[in-house]
Image: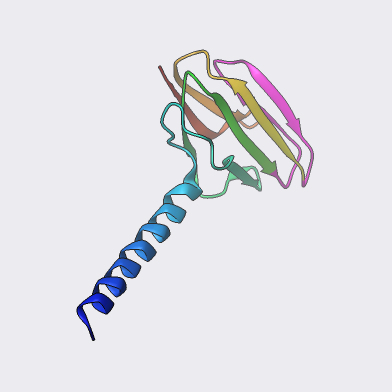
Amino acid sequence: MSRNALRALGAAVVLAFAGGLYLLLDGAGEDRRPGSAAKGVPTIVVRDGEPVGGVRELTFYSDEAIRFRVSSDTAQEVHLHGYDIAKEVEPGGAVAFDVPADISGIFEAELEVSEEQIARVTVRP
């Protein structure tokens, strides 16, 4: 194999690795830096009254919005503490939160009736 072919192959491997790493990290969509565009809205799936995969860690910055969705197989009231916003989700439905991140701190998102925490929302200055 020629030297140029080896370089091209090496570059292709590096690009493939970087692309895979980008897709892996981008799917989380949870720890973004100020000024960056949101790549996706995290969705918390609630099954049988509990968050699938455990409590989600969501981080936002004060110059953006707190955005996440909650889907549930049962009727639930989802409450974002600190911001005091509650939304009803119907069985098999979903609700979306889109709130200016104007209060810094760490807040719980929970299923109000069962007091089951589904997310830990951090808002950084």
Q: Quadrant of the N terminus?
A: bottom left
For residue 23, above or below residue 8: above
The answer to whether any part of residue 80 appears in the image is: yes
Quarter of the figure with residue 68: top right
Q: Looking at the picture, how far across and down is residue 96, in whole percent?
A: 68, 33
31 in the magenta segment:
no
The answer to whether any part of residue 112 appears in the image is: no
For residue 19, above or below residue 48: below
Q: Which residues are magenta?
A: 72-92
Count of number-bearing discs: 0
Q: Looking at the picture, how far across and down is residue 39, in whole percent?
A: 54, 42
Quarter of the figure with residue 100: top right
Q: Looking at the picture, how far across and down is residue 52, in whole percent?
A: 56, 49
Horizontal side, residue 17 vs residue 52: left or right: left
Q: Looking at the picture, how far across and down is residue 89, in whole percent?
A: 75, 35
Closer-to-camera residue (23/10): 10
Closer-to-camera residue (41/57): 41
* Residue reaching furthest to the left: 3
Quarter of the figure with residue 33: top left
